[in-house]
Image (cartoon, grey):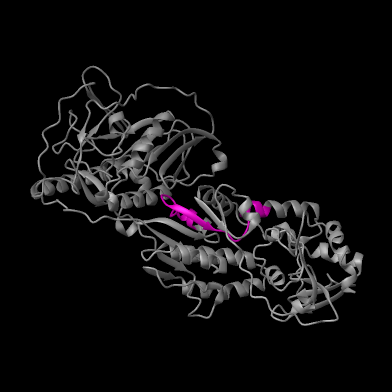
Amino acid sequence: MAARDGAHRPPPNHMTASGDFRMIAPARTGQRHVRTRGDVMTLLSHETAQPEAEWRVPSRLSGLIFAAKAAGLRLQRRAHDLGAPVARLRAADPAEYPVLLAESRTALWSDTRDSEAAHQFGKVENLRQAAKRFDRIAIPADGIFSFWKQLGRPTARRGFVAGRMLKEGCLVASTGGGLCQLSNALFDIALKSGAEIVERHAHSRRVPGSAAQFGRDATVAWNYVDFRFKAPQDLMLRATLSDKHLLLRFYGKVSRRRVERLQSPYAAPIAPEAARDCGSCSQTGCHRHEGEAARAVGRTAFLLDEAWPEFRAYVRERRASTDVLGIPLDGKRWNRPRYAWETEGFAAVTAATQTTLWHAYRARRETAQNRRVAAQLLRSKAIAEKLAQSLAPDVTELCVAQSLLPFLGEMGVLGGRRVTVLMTRLPVAVLQARLDAAASAHPERATLSDFRAPASLVAAETEALAAAERIVTPHAEIAALFPARAEILDWQLPKPTPRAERKRLAIAFPGPSIARKGAHALREAALALDLEILVVGPGPEGDLEGGDFWQGLNVRSVARQSDWLDQAAVVVQPSLIEEQPRALLAALAAGVPVIAGKSCGIPPRSGLTLLDDTEAATLIHSLAGIAHSVH
């Protein structure tokens, strides 16, 4: 962001008293004049202009004068907008805007000097905050877009931090600094999409990484120096940050004929001088001089959920003493092994304890009403919102649990950071497509279609996964979806325990008795081969497919915590979907053969038979050879 000392209607030259901005329109030879049409006001200028006034060291008095002028101009802007109000724009449905009209991609980390690292972190944080307020807004045909009307005042209370701002010819530290990169990019795509520029001001100094030298810049300063344009058709703006770039795109409903321009019609009349920055300026006597800045470095935040043993080892090996940790709660303190992360060795630890405990209670209540998965999504969203508060601007890398990822993406905190995802299940889009296909093939199996995530959540996870730098998982099937980015961890097998000699052996099914876990295929195989089934978990009354699901079969139920492996000749789970195959790993560690679908995520190994599909015929063929041992 660059503060400017100039009125909403500038005098008939290119500079105000402080020389901090110009309002520029298409170059035209001849006498310059001001044209006013409603709230459309443009200064038409000569192609050339007089050289800028000599730069002078700012004084406290000049700063007070600058502030007084700015305050007066803000009042003038408010009065102007009362007579010609501009509406704040609402969110759009991307499906209604199929045509890409224009895009801009600009580097986030444009100043690589160590002295400016802290302010680069601040600039990116400010762009992060602004982008989430602009992303997916709809601009109706002939509607006016106003940068400040849409964004609002960039204050610390609203999440904005210190970045560089151009003031009196100098780049100084100020809350909201760096937003000009966004207004520059908006100006660029507005031109490309054929929009009519209503208000635009050029920088008077050249900023590192700025578009001023190409005539594609549009500076802004709350709220009297605005950027406004009129939409040529119904538009939707996408504003996102990758780890390295600010990405802006305009989508429309109809195509626009592309017009190539060798030179911008908004070329600056003179090349601006380079701006001085207070971090490296030689004017040590200036009251704004900052002195030598300490070198700032980025750090990693680990925002985690379930403490899988594979992920505990991964985090332990990669954490640094400056990194931060965010977890649902301290599992060791609360005796919750599910969240037993190691909290030592981090600079700071944030726990969403109250949020987690409340949603654990709520989940039990919702499970009784068959709304378990919906309750889990509410829990993950609440924890993500809590942990996101711990992200400082200098966090340049994130290691994120998959359950939190889509919600962090919707909050806009992933942009401008390198993201590693700890994945525990298939992407929701893939998972639901698989369930839909199975439900279509077997419509009588009601549990195959019992829940679907909201479309917005599916889209948010898909987008966040596409932008992630690395996918970390021990699950072989998940890793196969990301061949170029996956880091595959080894499953950690439990310590094997001696098996007691039993005369009676059965087919052990880890359960639960539900279609997606392969219960129907196993039931058909048991009927065909006259097998005894050992169901691990609740008894038949707890079967999700109905209390009579196992009727007519030789079925016994055993609690998960018991010595069920001692009674198993083979463990069978022809799952359509399997997230965490701990029961299968325990069987393999104990030397019990396992037959499972490839969705179990365990790579080929001794004692494991992987099924190409989860149909009953395939399972019967695999079981036929050992059926005699379970009678």
Q: With respect to residue 624, does 30 lie above or below?
A: above
Q: Residue at x 14, y 51 (%)?
A: 288
Magenta residues (range) = 408-432
Q: Residue at x 74, y 80 (%)?
A: 499
User: Residue 498: where, in percent of width, then height?
Assistant: 72, 80
Q: Residue at x 13, y 45 (%)?
A: 282
Q: Is residue 627 left or right of residue 408?
A: right
User: Residue 483: where, in percent of width, then height?
Assistant: 59, 48
The tally of labels here is 0
Q: Is residue 190 left or right of residue 77?
A: right
In the image, residue 345 lies in the stretch drawn in magenta: no
Residue 176 in sight in this render? no
Instruction: Identify the image quadrant of residue 591.
Output: bottom right
Residue 96 in sight in this render? yes
User: Residue 72: where, in percent of width, then height?
Assistant: 18, 45
Q: Nearer the viewer, residue 57 or 200?
A: 57
Q: Quadrant of the N terminus?
A: top left
In the image, residue 409 lies in the stretch drawn in magenta: yes
Q: Nearer the viewer, residue 565 or 78?
A: 565
Q: Is residue 183 left or right of residue 9?
A: right
